[in-house]
């Protein structure tokens, strides 16, 4: 199987991380939105049922309350014990008034019926009847057998209108509130019925609802009390296609939701059982309608996800190739994109790994070559150190860099030995063999002297120089070690090479910056072979009364620092360095004639610096004589130092200072111009410095030196100047002035103005105008 390239793997991975989130988010959003639709519909159905229940039960409570007033009235209690005939007109009229008053509370109350089985009478809207003569006498008296002393019962409307030719309400069923009479006795022989047409409750249902997506009310027995289709009132719930009444009746919760089938279709049923009369309020919602809404969301989600997938795939394809670009560039740079080079291999990292491995091999080989040349570099460094061409700090850093850190930390006493080969007629070597012999002596020195006690031997011309060091601070013990080492070295070379060598020893020193002095001391000792003979070990302390070699080195570093201070026009620093330079020169203990050499050198180097900086001699020296002649006529140190300062150095500093002032003035003028033209903008010192191509701290110090103001103070001062001009010459509101001067809040401007001028802007304007009016016109 062919191995996939990294580009293919990267593209596939990019496709995966771009497609999977889109699919997940799309699916999650679809199912979440469908669930939320179902949840919201169910919640709305619950709210609707609760509202309808509240409205219906409010009407029923009103009827119950008014009927209670009738049955508890003294008129009805009196009538229950009276047969009520044509002679009891007044009592009958009082009862009729009670009934009329009850019906006035609610216009939907169809009729109030009172019947007394014991006294054989019945009163209703149409009049007074003998109960046993009423057509539906038996059905009415059977209502005495209803459970409870007060209950709501669904009755056919024809039960109460048998004497009329038609049903005036047009509703087949009435909902009757039945109360047994008398209310205060155990034996019940009368009834009070308040009849409400079942159709009148239909007003609480939205007429636009579909028959199965609607509200339906059932009584305790499962008969329909309320339904959008009036023909189903009084019918069992199954007649409306609802088969879940038993499930609701068996449920312990007063409300809930479940799914069932209505007319062979899936519906979500939300129900609530009334605590007042046990009626069951139902709401049926078609699952198909919910699915239809979810389908719309699903379609929209599919379109959006498809677009996102296409966009993600495009971005993944472009991104993978963009990310692959550095790898491809790397392959091209290391030459792995040539035709035929990758035949049979497609893993770019394998190719790069092989190339890197090859580079590491080359690196190892290069390191070996560098390590071979490191000795030559170290030797060159030591030659520079012996020549005195390095400062102390540079010398220490280089020693540590070249692996001598341990010696720098531990060595307390050091000396330089210089070895030279003595040719004679007795040996078989010639002068042309000198370099080979020195190389052999070099190798032997490295073997004979431990690394802990030496630096690398260095060939200096026709001699071999070595720095010998010890951790011991004692001079005697160091001398013994040094003498033993040089004698051993001399003997071994003599035995192996059959040569005589002479060795010069410097005085002991305790700081590495004295290497150059010690080297010259060892060379000076070695020169005395002319008088002392061959094959000897010569100590410098025996030649110069134990003093170090006279150091005639000129203090170059101090002079360089002095020249830098002159160019920077730093008078104090230059004067301090001049004093330091003279102190170094006159501490050498030279003769008066020898002192002319470093003094003449200082004057000459100063004149060279002037010439390189474009300063002519005529700008500082106007006499007709010569500076060198004046210098040779001076004999006192203080006089010579003062002459250098007043005649040469200070005039040069003045010239450099004037040059700096011109530059400072130019910078300050540019900053002032920016402020005067852009004071009403958000100006900062950093922005101005960037525009002038200077460092912000530098131009800040220059501006303060030239104007005696900080930049921010000058900007505020100029803005207040413009503010006073606008207050004097215009009617511009203070708020607008503050805004133009970049104040975020006019109150801040007013406070700053008062602090600056001792009065508010408004007071300043009034004061100016008052003064202006006080000036006579003729003036």
Image: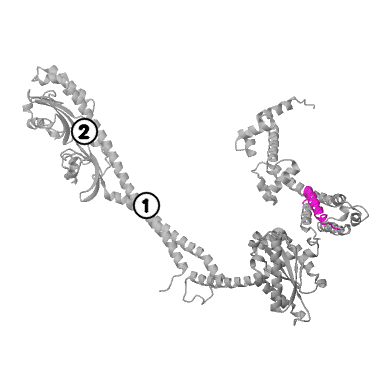
User: Which residue bears the numbered disc 1?
Assistant: 29
Residue 485 marker: none
Residue at 16% across / 38% down in the picture?
Answer: 220
Main SS of residues in magenta = helix
- Percent position of residue 453, x then y: 66, 65
Residue located at (22% from left, 29% from top): 61
- Which of these two is toward me, 8 or 46? 8
At 20% from the left and 36% from the top, the residue drawn is: 199
Tags 2 and 1 in contact by the CB under 8 Å rule? Answer: no
In the rendered image, which quarter is residue 673 located in? top right
Q: Position of residue 737 (x, y in %)?
A: 64, 36
- Measured as percent of width and height from the top left, residue 268 is found at 25, 47
Quadrant in which the C terminus is drawn = top right
Where residue 204 sits, quadrant-wise, is: top left
Q: CA distance from mark 2 to mark 1?
A: 43 Å
Q: Residue at x 63, y 39 (%)?
A: 742
Q: Which residue is mark 2?
A: 276
Can see residue 662?
no
Estimate how packed mark 2 is, as few (under 14), some (14 to 19) or many (20 or more) residues with alpha carbons within 10 Å: few
């Amino acid at each position: 199987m062919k191995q996939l390239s990294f580009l293919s793997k990267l593209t596939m991975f990019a496709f995966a991380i771009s497609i999977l989130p889109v699919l997940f988010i799309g699916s999650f959003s679809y199912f979440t939105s469908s669930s939320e639709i179902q949840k919201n519909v169910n919640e709305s159905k619950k709210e609707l049922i609760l509202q309808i229940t509240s409205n219906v039960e409010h009407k029923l409570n009103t009827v119950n309350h008014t009927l209670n007033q009738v049955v508890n009235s003294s008129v009805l209690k009196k009538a229950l014990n009276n047969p009520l005939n044509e002679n009891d007109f007044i009592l009958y009229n009082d009862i009729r008034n009670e009934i009329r008053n009850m019906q006035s509370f609610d216009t939907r109350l169809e009729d109030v019926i009172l019947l007394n089985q014991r006294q054989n009478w019945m009163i209703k809207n149409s009049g007074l009847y003998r109960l046993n003569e009423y057509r539906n006498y038996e059905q009415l008296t059977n209502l005495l057998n209803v459970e409870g002393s007060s209950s709501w019962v669904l009755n056919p409307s024809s039960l109460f209108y048998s004497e009329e030719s038609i049903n005036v309400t047009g509703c087949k069923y009435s909902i009757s509130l039945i109360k047994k009479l008398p209310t205060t006795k155990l034996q019940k022989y009368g009834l009070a019925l308040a009849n409400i047409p079942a159709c009148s409750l239909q007003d609480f249902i939205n007429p636009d609802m579909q028959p199965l997506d609607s509200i339906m009310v059932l009584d305790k027995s499962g008969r329909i009390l309320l339904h959008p289709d009036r023909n189903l009132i009084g019918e069992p719930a199954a007649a409306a296609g609802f088969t879940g009444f038993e499930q609701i009746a068996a449920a312990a919760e007063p409300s809930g939701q479940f799914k069932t089938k209505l007319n062979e279709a899936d519906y979500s049923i939300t129900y609530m059982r009334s605590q007042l009369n046990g009626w069951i309020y139902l709401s049926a919602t078609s699952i198909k309608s919910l699915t239809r809404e979810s389908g719309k969301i699903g379609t929209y989600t599919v379109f959006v996800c498809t677009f996102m997938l296409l966009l993600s795939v495009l971005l993944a394809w472009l991104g993978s190739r963009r990310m692959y670009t550095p790898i491809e560039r790397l392959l091209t740079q290391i030459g792995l994109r040539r035709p035929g080079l990758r035949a049979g291999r497609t893993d770019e990292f394998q190719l790069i790994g092989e190339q890197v491995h090859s580079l590491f091999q080359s690196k190892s080989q290069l390191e070996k070559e560098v390590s071979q040349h490191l000795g030559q570099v170290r030797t060159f460094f030591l030659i520079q150190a012996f020549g005195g061409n390095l400062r102390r700090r540079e010398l220490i850093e280089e020693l540590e860099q070249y692996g001598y850190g341990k010696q720098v930390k531990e060595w307390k006493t050091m000396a330089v030995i210089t070895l030279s080969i003595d040719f004679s007629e007795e040996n078989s070597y010639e002068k042309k063999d000198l370099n080979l012999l020195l190389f052999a002596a070099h190798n032997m020195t490295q073997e004979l002297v431990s690394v802990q006690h030496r630096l690398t031997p260095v060939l200096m011309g026709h001699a071999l120089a070595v720095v010998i060091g010890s951790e011991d601070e004692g001079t005697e013990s160091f001398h013994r070690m040094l003498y033993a080492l040089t004698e051993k070295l001399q003997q071994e070379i003599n035995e192996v090479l059959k040569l005589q060598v002479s060795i010069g020893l410097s005085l002991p020193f305790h700081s590495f910056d004295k290497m150059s002095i010690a080297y010259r001391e060892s060379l000076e000792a070695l020169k005395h072979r002319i008088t002392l003979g061959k094959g000897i070990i010569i100590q410098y302390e025996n030649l110069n009364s134990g003093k170090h070699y006279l150091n005639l080195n000129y203090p170059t570093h101090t002079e360089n620092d002095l020249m830098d201070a002159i160019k920077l026009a730093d008078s104090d620093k230059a004067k301090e360095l001049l004093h330091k330079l003279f102190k170094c020169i006159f501490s050498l203990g030279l003769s008066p004639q020898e002192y002319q050499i470093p003094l003449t050198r200082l004057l000459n180097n100063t004149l060279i610096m002037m010439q390189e900086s474009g300063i002519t001699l005529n700008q500082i020296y106007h006499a007709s004589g010569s500076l060198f002649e004046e210098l040779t006529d001076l004999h006192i140190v203080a006089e010579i130092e003062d002459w250098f300062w007043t005649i040469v150095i200070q005039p040069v500093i003045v010239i450099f200072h004037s040059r700096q002032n011109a530059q400072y003035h130019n910078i300050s003028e540019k900053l002032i111009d920016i402020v005067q033209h852009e004071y009403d903008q958000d100006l900062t010192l950093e922005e101005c410095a960037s525009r002038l191509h200077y460092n912000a701290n530098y131009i800040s110090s220059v501006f303060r030196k030239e104007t005696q103001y900080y930049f921010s103070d000058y900007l505020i001062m100029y803005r207040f100047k413009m503010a006073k001009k606008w207050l004097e010459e215009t009617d511009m509101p203070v708020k607008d002035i503050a805004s133009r001067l970049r104040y975020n809040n006019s109150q801040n401007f007013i406070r700053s103005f008062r602090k600056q001028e001792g009065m508010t802007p408004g007071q300043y304007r009034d004061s100016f105008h008052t003064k202006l009016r006080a000036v006579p016109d003729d003036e």
